[in-house]
Image: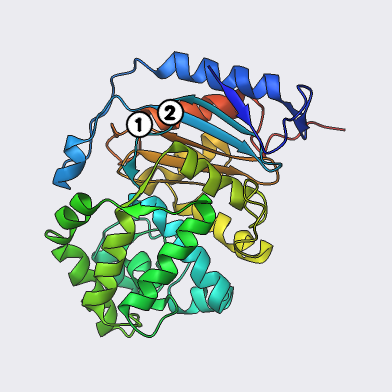
Amino acid sequence: MVRAQAKTQAPKAATTGSLSDADIEAALTEAYNKFKDLKEGKNADYIKELANVDPNIFGIVLITTDGRVFTKGDITSMVSIQSVSKVFTMAKVLEEQGHQAVMDKIGVDATGMRFNSIVAVELQRGKEINPLVNPGAIAASSLIGGADSAAKWKNIMDIHNQFAGRQLSVNWPVYVSEAGDNLRNQAIAHLLKAYNRMYFDPVQATDIYTKQCAINVNAKDLATMAATLANGGVNPVTKKKVVSPETVMYTLPVMATAGLYDDSGIWLYNSGLPAKSGVGGGLLAVCPGKFGIAAVSPPLDAAGNSVKSQKAINYVVEKLKADPYLVQPK
């Protein structure tokens, strides 16, 4: 059963904008029931540990900007965050160095190529990539503040903890599995270094990036992280400021243009929401000023995005009429 949680019990008629508790509860319940038995997609298997994750995990969480939490399904099973982590490392770099540094040192354009494309790096000589594809994400990890790899890793872990509102941990089997087979990412890092677009040791930066992708999260963690972005950088559950509104302002457009791999445009067309997916099965989306929503379901489509998570979130957005591009005439 869907439940709402908050530090103080919200009245039944509580709303965020025009969204009532009853509306949200109904939308989540309908989405869960509609897609829970869907068998499309398959677990990622190029990372061996991901192939072993239970494909039946399925949970949806929506958290409003005033801190009300709505859940349905499995919200406790952990999956590795994978590429969703790129959002929060990017946000930290933005917070530390400003939006111009990210534009100048990494880039913010969608590449139009695969998320791990070496050709995209070569064609642009390391420029005009973005922090949500592998080359830009590795560059972002190299830019994170810290004198050495340990300090940089602590910085990355801290920002993820603050966004989630709790202490997260690394899924070490997933990390070991990825670290033993990340030669392509190492090659990308060295190519970036050749074009002076790597800002720390390429091997260590790749390792930091690989480790951040192995952070364990559940659907509630991801929804809290999304809701923090929706709330201008203040975690609506812990009430703590994580990043500035300006950092969020520059994070969301990159999510909108590059958040779902090759299907980013299709996702934005259907939902209107900045979002980010990961091959662990997690997907989060941000409705600015209203809520963050996330779903977890490991089976992926051909583009690497969770099948159930996409369908469930799109369903909820449609039911709540939450697409920000849907404007009713005055």
Kind of residue sitting beneath label 1:
Ser
Residue shown at 66% from the left, 36% from the top: 6
> Is residue 191 among the parts visible in the rendering?
no
Above/below status of 72 relative to 156? above
Residue shown at 65% from the left, 26% from the top: 320
**Quarter placement of the C terminus:** top right
Kind of residue sitting beneath label 2:
Gly
Horizontal placement of 210 versus 219: left or right? left
Query: Observer-nearest residue: 85 or 79?
Result: 79
Q: Residue furthest right?
A: 330
Secondary structure, mark 2, is: strand
Secondary structure, mark 1, is: loop
Q: Measured from the top left, where is residue 98 in percent x and y?
A: 58, 76
Q: Measured from the top left, where is residue 97 in percent x and y?
A: 54, 78
Residue shown at 38% from the left, 60% from the top: 111
Residue shown at 18% from the left, 50% from the top: 173
Q: Specify few, some or many for label 2: CA neighbours under 10 Å numbering under 14, 14-19, or 20 or more.
A: many
Q: Measured from the top left, where is residue 221 in percent x and y?
A: 47, 44
Q: Which mark is residue 297?
A: 1
Which residue is tagged 2?
A: 59
Closer to viewer: mark 2 or mark 1: 2
Kindly indicate whether the residue at mark 1 contacts the one at mark 2 (C-beta within 8 angstroms): yes
Horizontal placement of 198 versus 254: left or right? left
Q: Quadrant of residue 146?
A: bottom left
Q: Measured from the top left, where is residue 121 in percent x and y?
A: 29, 70
Q: Specify few, some or many for label 1: CA neighbours under 10 Å numbering under 14, 14-19, or 20 or more.
A: many
